[in-house]
């Protein structure tokens, strides 16, 4: 089997091809409706429509025992498997490359328990993030992670990618809030580590190995996570500033003056907002255009207190001349509308044909220079024009979780071409490495960055990752052709 999508990647002959006998075996484990062999496009193709595999089979187990039985069998039979959550990942990690079996967690969607005193929530891996958060809201709690894909991505999927999202600034990384995991190892063994302890210093913290492992070393089937109380008061301020320098000054000021109520600090450049405006066709929050925009969210337990603090902060920032313009949400609808100007950028940046995405960590002072350098390079190569439709690239735009030092560089294109890809890679990775940044802040490596891990991890670190993979997945059946 060859793949016209990836001519340079060859199917590994050590993996067996699916037979009718295999299907018959799966019928002894799963109900017929959980074995899908037709209309697999939505499972084979990723959210960006950039990566496409050729799987002939999707299995949808409904409990951990079934996942275990499937992996045990696949391990023996040398059948490769790709775990799939909500399929919203952005690095091609959740779809097969060739004919790997897709193991979808979407049938495992039960909430297992919730402790109203401690805030500890346990659920199946396939619970959709928004459903988990809605459940928690009824009890006065909040899921400590929020992101634009919440309506589709799974709790297990965000754990497997160690997603960061919009409120990492407030709630920290999943490495801190996940308390325990239930994981099926590649040989079918179930690792029951679904603990409920905040503090546990008895040897290695095993769950950490799976958080951010991108389905390469085990399938997460259950998650135990500590959830904080849901703030009762939320505010959003949407600001216009004239330089990246000003973005940084507002950030310093916001941390100092908004203190404990600051829950998100996002930035967007003008081009990202122009693309969003063209896509959603709504009037922009601020009448005039600005070089950069900032979205600040505050959340706390007293609306009066938070309003006063935010207003004072904005007044002073205007007086100091750091902010040119701004608007504060009046009510919940407006709050969501303002967030949309940030959350809709990923969709808007690919609406004209496609997008090359780079999700990087950089020292704050260098964060935006990557966008400038990329635009310069694309223009010099004669590949980019906002108006000339014969050029493949429209523009490189920058936005992201500036509070976490995380830039999203999106290169909006009219079509995917090898020429553009060659112009961008390894250029972007070299740039990031030269600033001692990370080539993946939160989306992972997946298939897209499989050859580039060395730009962030050293040879010794890569060897240790490979050793762990080989130890737990001797037959290498789990999510092959990806970053390991
Ligand atoms: P999938 O896409 O299905 O899978 C992702 C990876 O995890 C794959 O390698 C897959 O094999 C593996 N996997 C999935 N489930 C399991 C499991 N149960 N056990 C083992 N492995 C598994 N990411 C951020 O970090 N921050 C953001 O702000 C953010 N915003 C986004 C906004 C949009 C509109 C979109 C489309 C994506 C965004 N993402 C963001 C990307 C992010 O990686 C995913 O949304 C999410 O983490 C993936 O969850 P999923 O359930 O869709 O997993
Ligand atoms: C976000 O922060 C996501 O909106 C997606 O991480 C970023 O699409 C992207 O590049
Ligand atoms: Zn992000």
Image: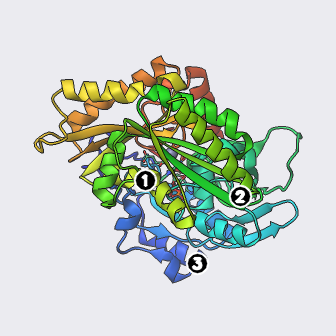
Picture residue at 68% right of the left edge, 73% below the top: 110
- The residue that mark 1 highlights is 341
Give the percent coordinates (x, y) of residue 396: 31, 37
Q: Is residue 445 visible?
A: no
Left or right: residue 21 versus residue 98 is right
First in sequence: mark 2 or mark 3?
A: 3
Q: Nearer the viewer, residue 482 or 119?
A: 119
Ligand 2 under 8 Å from disc 1 Cβ: no
When asked about the image quadrant of residue 426, the answer is: top left
Q: How many numbered marks have been drawn onto this rendered protein structure?
A: 3
Tag 2 secondary structure: helix
Q: Which residue is mark 2?
A: 303
Q: CA distance from mark 1 to mark 2?
A: 23 Å
Q: Is residue 172 left or right of residue 280?
A: right
Q: Secondary structure at mark 1?
A: helix
Q: Quadrant of residue 258?
A: top right
Q: Which of the two labelled residues, at mark 1 and mark 2, occupies the earlier sequence position?
A: 2
| Alpha carbons under labels 1 and 3: distance apart | 49 Å
Which of label 1 and label 2 is nearer to you? 2
**x and y percentages locating residue 28 in the rendered image:** 58, 78
Q: Nearer the viewer, mark 1 or mark 3?
A: 1
Q: Report the residue that reaches farthest toward the front.
A: 319
Looking at the image, which residue is at 88% across and 44% down? 200
Q: Badge 2: how crowded within 10 Å, few (<14), some, or many (20+)?
A: some
Crowd band around label 3 with a 10 angstrom C-alpha radius: few (<14), some (14–19), many (20+): few
Give the camera-side residue of 260 and 321.
Answer: 321
Residue occupying the point 76% across, 44% down: 206
Asked whether residue 229 appears in the rendered view, the answer is yes
Mark carried by residue 28: 3
């Amino acid at each position: 089997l060859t793949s016209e999508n990836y001519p340079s990647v060859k199917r590994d002959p050590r993996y067996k091809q699916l037979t009718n006998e295999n299907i018959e075996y799966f019928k002894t484990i799963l109900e017929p409706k959980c074995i899908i062999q037709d209309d697999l496009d939505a499972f084979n193709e990723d959210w960006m429509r950039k990566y496409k595999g050729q799987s002939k089979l999707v299995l949808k187990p409904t409990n951990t025992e079934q996942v275990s039985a499937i992996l045990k069998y696949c391990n023996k039979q040398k059948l490769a498997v790709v775990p799939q959550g909500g399929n919203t990942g952005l690095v091609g990690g959740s779809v097969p490359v060739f004919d790997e079996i897709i193991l979808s967690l979407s049938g495992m969607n039960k909430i297992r328990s919730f402790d109203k005193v401690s805030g500890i929530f346990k659920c199946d891996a396939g619970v959709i993030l928004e459903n988990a958060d809605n459940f928690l809201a009824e009890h006065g709690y909040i899921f400590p992670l929020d992101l634009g894909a919440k309506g589709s991505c799974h709790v297990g999927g965000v754990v497997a990618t160690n997603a960061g999202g919009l409120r990492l600034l407030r709630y920290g990384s999943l490495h801190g809030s996940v308390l325990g995991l239930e994981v099926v190892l590649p040989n079918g063994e179930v690792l029951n580590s679904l603990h409920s302890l905040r503090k546990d210093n008895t040897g290695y913290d095993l769950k950490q190995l799976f958080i951010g492992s991108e389905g390469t070393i085990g399938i997460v089937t259950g998650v135990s996570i500590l959830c904080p109380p849901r703030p009762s008061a939320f505010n959003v301020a949407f600001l216009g500033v004239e330089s990246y320098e000003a973005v940084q000054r507002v950030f310093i000021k916001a941390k100092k003056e908004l203190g404990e109520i600051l829950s998100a600090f996002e930035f967007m450049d003008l081009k990202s907002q122009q693309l969003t405006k063209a896509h959603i066709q709504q009037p922009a929050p601020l009448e005039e255009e600005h070089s950069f925009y900032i979205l600040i969210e505050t959340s706390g337990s007293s609306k009066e207190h938070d309003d006063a603090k935010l207003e004072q902060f904005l007044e002073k920032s205007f007086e100091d001349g750091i902010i040119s313009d701004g608007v504060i949400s009046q009510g919940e609808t407006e709050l969501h509308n303002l967030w949309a100007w940030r959350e809709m950028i990923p969709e808007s940046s690919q609406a004209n044909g496609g997008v090359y995405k780079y999700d990087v960590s950089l020292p704050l002072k260098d964060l935006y220079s990557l966008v400038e350098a990329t635009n310069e390079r694309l223009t010099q190569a004669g590949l980019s024009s906002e108006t000339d439709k014969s050029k493949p690239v429209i523009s490189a735009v920058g936005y992201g979780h500036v509070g976490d030092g995380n830039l999203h560089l999106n290169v909006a294109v009219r079509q995917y071409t090898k020429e553009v890809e060659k112009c961008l890679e390894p250029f972007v990775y070299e740039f990031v490495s030269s600033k001692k940044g990370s080539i993946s802040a939160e989306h992972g490596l997946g298939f897209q960055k499989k050859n580039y891990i060395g730009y962030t991890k050293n040879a010794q670190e890569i060897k240790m990752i490979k050793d762990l993979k080989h130890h737990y997945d001797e037959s290498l059946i789990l999510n092959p052709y990806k970053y390991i």
